[in-house]
Amino acid sequence: MKVKIKKNYQQFLIYFTGFLFVTTSVLSVMKVGGLLAYEQVPLETANIPNSQDVINLPNFEGPDLPVKKPDAIYPEFSAFSIFAIDVESGTVLFEKNPDIQILPASTTKIMTALVAMEAYDVDQIMVVPKIRVAGQKMNLINGEMISVRDLLYGLLVASANDAAEVLAYYYPLNSRQGFIQRMNEKAKEIGMENTFFTNPTGLEDIGHLSTARDMVALSIYAMQNPFFASIVGTKQITLKSFDGAYKHNLLSINQLLGEVEGVLGVKTGWTENAKENLVSYVQRNGRTIAIALLGSDDRFGESKKLIEWLYENYSWQKVYEP
């Protein structure tokens, strides 16, 4: 990498002169017979650059940055709120009302899963209590014995509300309310400034709100967990209760898995008032994008449209600090 020494030269010269004064020589390290040996280099051979020199400074290189085509035309979407970011550099690629609080629906379950993974051993067996829950279910049976691992699959693959309630039910001390409290504590730790949870399922509730920006931050955090990432990337799975008495066939609600190149997860969401939500994590040619698309009339079609537009209209280029 070629970098011209300009304003950095004065600091470089001061540092280098001080180094020479203390050591009176430049040490080069060589590996000899498996041991480290030091060879003294005469001072007169040391190359001190002047302001006109061009030298290699690899530590000045940052991540490749996404650069949008100058003639790119922004697409239109029905979604009320959208936020898309280049994960490596943190560059915002697309946004529409990213900080307005709206109903997150079952994208909430990303946080539910993280708190459950933090609280329980995945091999722990839970006995399904008598619970009544609306919405999507994996059809757990009262008294069924099932592992935390399988409940997490039900939670994230089938978006099962009954799995969410079982995981919250067994939380220590304050039980379900303590679980929800921990969800909100973890949201603050992650930096989700405009999010508040009142339940572990995402069902509509007063004050249960989030934003597209916060959901992107949550998804990036969650996808660093290999177990979480493997679950949300699962298209289909069959689970059995601990004693083999019950079987659950799960099919992912996320229609982009296996259909759109590079999609690795993350989570769907829907309620009547929230409309259609989808948080996506996509990787192509080593470039990773995280997207939250909330309040849409067509979450899968619009997410696919946005994914293709981003990869077609951005190129990743090396940028050097002058």
Image (spheres, rainbow, N blue to C red):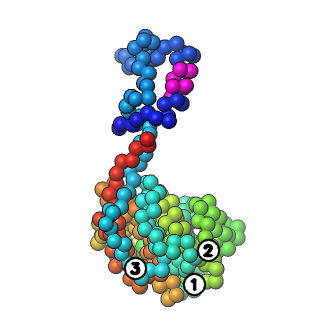
Dot 1 or dot 2, earlier in sequence:
2
Q: CA distance from mark 1 to mark 2?
A: 10 Å
Dot 3 or dot 2, earlier in sequence:
3
How far from the left and from the top, in percent, is residue 91? 45, 58
Q: Which residue is mark 2?
A: 197
- Queried whether the magenta region covers residue 17, the answer comes back as yes
In the rendered structure, are the residues bearing label 1 and label 2 in contact, judged by CB atoms less than 8 Å apart?
no
Q: Is 161 in front, or is 92?
A: 92
Res 212 seen here = yes
Q: CA distance from mark 3 to mark 2?
A: 27 Å
- Name the residue: 35% across, 36% down: 2
Q: CA distance from mark 1 to mark 3?
A: 24 Å
What amino acid type should be assigned to the residue bearing mark 2?
Phe
How far from the left and from the top, in percent, is residue 198? 63, 77
- Chain part drawn in magenta: 12-18
How far from the left and from the top, in percent, is residue 145? 52, 73
Residue 204 is tagged as 1
Q: Which residue is mark 3?
A: 77
Alpha-carbon neighbours of circle 2 within 10 Å: few (<14), some, or many (≥20)? many
In the image: residue 189, left or right of residue 318: right
How far from the left and from the top, in percent, is residue 12? 50, 29
Residue most extreme to the bottom: 272
In the rendered structure, are the residues bearing label 1 and label 3 in contact, judged by CB atoms less than 8 Å apart?
no
Quadrant of the drawing holding the N terminus: top left
